[in-house]
């Protein structure tokens, strides 16, 4: 039933292999791919590398990771916290365009994410926040036993050496330098009644703080999924990594149309001109390509909403309506109030100090201080806002079926309760190193979609990404309250001392006209870089894609471990939660595979007849 299929590659592959591709561990160019692997992992971001590391702890288990990007060069713009965001490490990013945002100004937005070993942790802003007890208890309420705060806590602890003295591969700490204006910010915030929070990661995230970062204390440099989970285990002979190859499709193995006995096998290639290479798995395929490309890979492999798949000309293997839906993000505004001199020293001197002593401004990431206010701390109209949130006409995408609508109704109940609490934030304000007071709505009610635009990842390869920012009006209402709060903040004596100047349209006088402020604001709202939910861990009746063991409904050995499985976005930056998801997933997979193969899980509706190519037969992606 699971007999391995010979690795099929052609001479054109061998050519590209010798020129561009790296296979690790380095075998001096000798081809070291095995005929088959116990586990094949698609994508070397957070989810992929955490699971790869943990599964390969057992030397008799073979693991292959396939990553579309390269390995980064550890240049200064990657490793030095002070360079984050200033010198965009674009060479390791894919730039994706979001569709015109009809509830904002009708314009598109750009979204970038890591395309490199380490995924988005190579390019992210280092902010390390877990979120609150209630954020994760909401996951459990939504039908995911074991995924509440108490169920996740051991896994929150596992990845990070943190301020609690606990051990793990990712280091979390504080820089050796604080921008002067961080102190102005924190004093100003406290003048407005927002309390300080000494430990935002203890389960009550609200308050204001100097923010913990994913950085090494000793070296004062970026700590990411690659340095934490891959570099220390590069020598493991049972862990192979192939870079520069995108997985093009997940194929059904022996067992064909009968999905209860089929194996999922990734085929991968650098691009459409090169014949597909097929890797065979003996146990499981784990999709960890992130919240955009995991759902797209499922869709073009025949797992997704039947209507979409038919329009793409893809045979429907499993009609799973949730694939690509329930997209959530923290909508964000980035007004800059001044370009005050944060450093008071020349760039060369700052660099010299960092390189010589690992001290000074370059140890500090762009975000130094944040505040996460509860709703009742920023507005007197709490009940009015909650009523608006509850009663606004729901504008879900027309493509959402009854199960997705049911799932959204359940999420909305959770969101209303989260918004009313004092230990979960309504919004965030981040003070950055260049005078930004960036604000994000932390309990977003809007939902969007990620849809493949063709049956091949190489053709029209940009998926259609529509976050539908402010399709639920409460998200914009909260951002407006946030802008008004910013205007109060800059008038507090500690902040006024910096002589901040609001950007055009956001001035204190101009903000008196709420209609005009709202219009200006809608032109500026953009992504918070926290896209999640597109392959949600939710019951089938709620439009879920994976069950609480992260297995795709209707399959036996296909799991997803990335930001897409988040059912409801926490009121926090999400990397800490994704590392925890990866750790918990690895334990689940180890436990389930200690004996027999995992059993089949429920399948939505009747199985559809599918015409998947058999691996021996398919040669083109
Ligand atoms: C600019 C930016 C700033 C951010 N700042 C912060 C922050 O300060 N704090 C925070 O907590 N979070 C932050 N985030 C979010 C956080 O880094 C991401 O949410 C997180 O890395 C997502 O993890 P993941 O495992 O889902 O996917 P990723 O880490 O993105 O990894 C997915 C991997 O899959 C690969 N892949 C995709 N398609 C294929 C394919 N077909 N075949 C093979 N490989 C494929 C990609 O190249 C990538 O390496 C930021 C994100 C961005 C983009
Ligand atoms: C390691 O993996 C092998 C093969 O799957 C299994 O038999 C063994 O029990 C595992 N060892 C541990 C310590 O889990
Ligand atoms: C940390 O510093 C040590 C020397 O003190 C050096 O060998 C190592 O490469 C550094 N690591 C990083 C990530 O900069
Ligand atoms: C599908 O697989 C199951 C379990 O292996 C088997 O019992 C069943 O007969 C198969 N059905 C078909 C149509 O092959
Ligand atoms: C595909 O790969 C070939 C060989 O590496 C290269 O010449 C060509 O430009 C690539 N095409 C695309 C669309 O990336
Ligand atoms: C920061 O504040 C200290 C103490 O108030 C002051 O001495 C220093 O010059 C300030 N630095 C900058 C860059 O403004
Ligand atoms: C590094 O630290 C030492 C000791 O404090 C100091 O004398 C030296 O000037 C520092 N070097 C730089 C480049 O700042
Ligand atoms: C959460 O912390 C804030 C700030 O310390 C405090 O005001 C609030 O009462 C706390 N909420 C709960 C429910 O503990
Ligand atoms: C989707 O594909 C069509 C061609 O089929 C193309 O015209 C369009 O630009 C693509 N959309 C995106 C968002 O890439
Ligand atoms: C407020 O702004 C709106 C939109 O720009 C404008 O139409 C309206 O006249 C303004 N109202 C006042 C009182 O200035
Ligand atoms: C390819 O598929 C065809 C039709 O499904 C089948 O007859 C043929 O045996 C397959 N070839 C191989 C090499 O498996």
Image: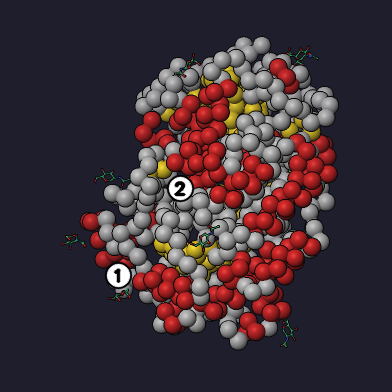
Q: Examine the image and state in which quarter residue 418 appears.
A: bottom right
Describe the element under mark 2 as helix, strand or loop. helix
How many other residues sit within 10 Å of disc 2, few (<14), some (14-19) or many (≥20)? many
Rendering coords of residue 238 (x, y %): 44, 21
Extreme-bottom residue of the structure: 509
Which quarter of the picture shows residue 110? bottom right
Residue at mark 1: C-beta within 8 A of ligand 6: no
Residue pictured at 57% horizontal, 61% vertical: 422
Residue 114 vs residue 474: left or right? left
Q: In the image, is residue 262 above or below residue 140? A: above
Q: Is residue 29 visible?
A: no
From mark 1 to mark 2, how far is it between C-alphas? 26 Å
Quarter of the image with the N terminus is top right
Q: Is the image coloured rainbow, by chain, by secondary structure, or in one colour? A: secondary structure
| In the foreground, 469 or 76 | 469
Residue highlighted by disc 2: 122
Residue 542 seen in the figure:
yes
Residue 453, relative to residue 24: is it above or below? Answer: below
Residue bearing the label numbered 1? 346
Q: Residues within 10 Å of mark 1 (few under 14, many from 20)?
A: few
Write the residue at 51% across / 75% down: 192
| Residue 52 image position (x, y, % from top left) | 48, 30
Quarter of the C terminus within the rendering = top right
Q: Nearer the viewer, residue 257 or 413?
A: 413
**Circles 1 and 2: CB atoms closer than 8 Å:** no
Residue at position x 42%, y 35% in the image: 230
Q: Residue at x 78, y 54 (%)?
A: 396
């Amino acid at each position: 039933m699971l007999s391995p299929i010979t690795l099929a590659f052609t001479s054109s592959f061998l050519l590209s292999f010798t020129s561009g591709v790296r296979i690790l561990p380095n075998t001096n160019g000798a081809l070291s791919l095995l005929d088959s692997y116990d586990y094949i992992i698609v994508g070397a971001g957070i989810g992929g590398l955490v699971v790869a590391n943990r599964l390969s702890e057992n030397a008799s288990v073979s693991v292959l990771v396939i990553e579309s990007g390269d390995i980064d060069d550890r240049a200064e713009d990657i490793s030095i916290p002070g360079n984050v965001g200033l010198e965009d490490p674009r060479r390791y990013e894919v730039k994706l365009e979001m569709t015109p945002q009809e509830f904002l100004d009708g314009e598109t937005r750009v979204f970038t994410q890591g395309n490199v070993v380490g995924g988005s942790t190579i390019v992210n802003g280092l902010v390390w926040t877990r979120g609150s007890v209630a954020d994760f208890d909401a996951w459990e309420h939504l039908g995911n036993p074991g995924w509440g705060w108490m169920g996740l806590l051991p896994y929150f602890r596992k990845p990070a050496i943190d301020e609690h003295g606990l051990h793990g591969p990712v280091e979390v700490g504080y820089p050796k330098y604080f921008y002067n204006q961080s102190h102005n910010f924190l004093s100003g915030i406290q003048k407005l009644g927002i309390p300080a929070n000494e430990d935002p990661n203890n389960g009550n995230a609200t308050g204001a703080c100097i923010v913990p970062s994913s950085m090494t204390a000793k070296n004062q440099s970026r700590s990411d999924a690659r340095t934490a989970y891959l570099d220390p285990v590069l020598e493991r002979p049972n862990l192979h990594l192939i870079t520069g190859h995108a997985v093009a499709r997940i194929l059904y193995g022996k067992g064909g149309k009968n999905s209860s006995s089929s194996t999922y096998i990734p085929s991968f290639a650098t691009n459409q001109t090169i014949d597909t290479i097929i890797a065979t798995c003996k146990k499981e395929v784990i999709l960890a390509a992130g919240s955009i490309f995991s759902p797209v890979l499922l869709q073009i492999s025949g797992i997704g909403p039947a209507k979409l798949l038919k329009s793409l000309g893809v045979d429907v293997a499993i009609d799973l309506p949730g694939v690509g839906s329930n997209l959530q993000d923290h909508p964000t505004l980035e007004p800059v109030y001044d370009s005050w001199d944060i450093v008071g020293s020349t760039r060369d001197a700052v660099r010299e100090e960092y390189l010589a002593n690992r001290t000074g401004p370059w140890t500090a990431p762009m975000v130094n201080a944040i505040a996460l206010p509860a709703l009742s701390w920023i507005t007197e109209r709490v009940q009015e806002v909650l009523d608006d949130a509850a009663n606004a006409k729901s504008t879900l995408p027309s493509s959402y079926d009854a199960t997705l609508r049911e799932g959204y109704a359940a999420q909305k109940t959770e969101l209303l309760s989260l918004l009313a609490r004092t230990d979960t934030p309504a919004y965030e304000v981040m003070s950055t190193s260049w005078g930004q007071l960036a604000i994000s709505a932390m309990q977003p009610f809007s939902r969007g979609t990620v849809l493949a635009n063709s049956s091949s990842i190489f053709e029209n390869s940009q998926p259609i990404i529509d976050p539908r920012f402010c399709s639920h009006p409460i998200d914009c209402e909260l951002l407006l309250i946030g802008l008004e709060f910013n205007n109060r903040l800059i008038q507090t004596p500690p902040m006024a001392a910096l002589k901040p100047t609001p950007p055009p349209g956001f001035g204190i006088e101009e903000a008196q006209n709420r209609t005009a402020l709202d219009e200006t604001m809608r032109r500026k709202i953009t992504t918070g870089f926290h896209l999640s939910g597109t392959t949600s861990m939710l019951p089938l009746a709620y439009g879920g894609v994976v069950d609480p063991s992260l297995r795709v409904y209707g399959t036996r050995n296909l799991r997803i471990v990335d930001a897409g499985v988040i059912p409801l976005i926490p009121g926090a930056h999400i990397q800490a939660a994704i590392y925890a998801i990866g750790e918990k997933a690895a334990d689940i997979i180890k436990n389930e595979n200690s004996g027999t193969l995992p059993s089949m899980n429920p399948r939505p509706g009747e199985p559809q007849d599918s015409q998947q190519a058999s691996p021996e037969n398919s040669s083109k992606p």
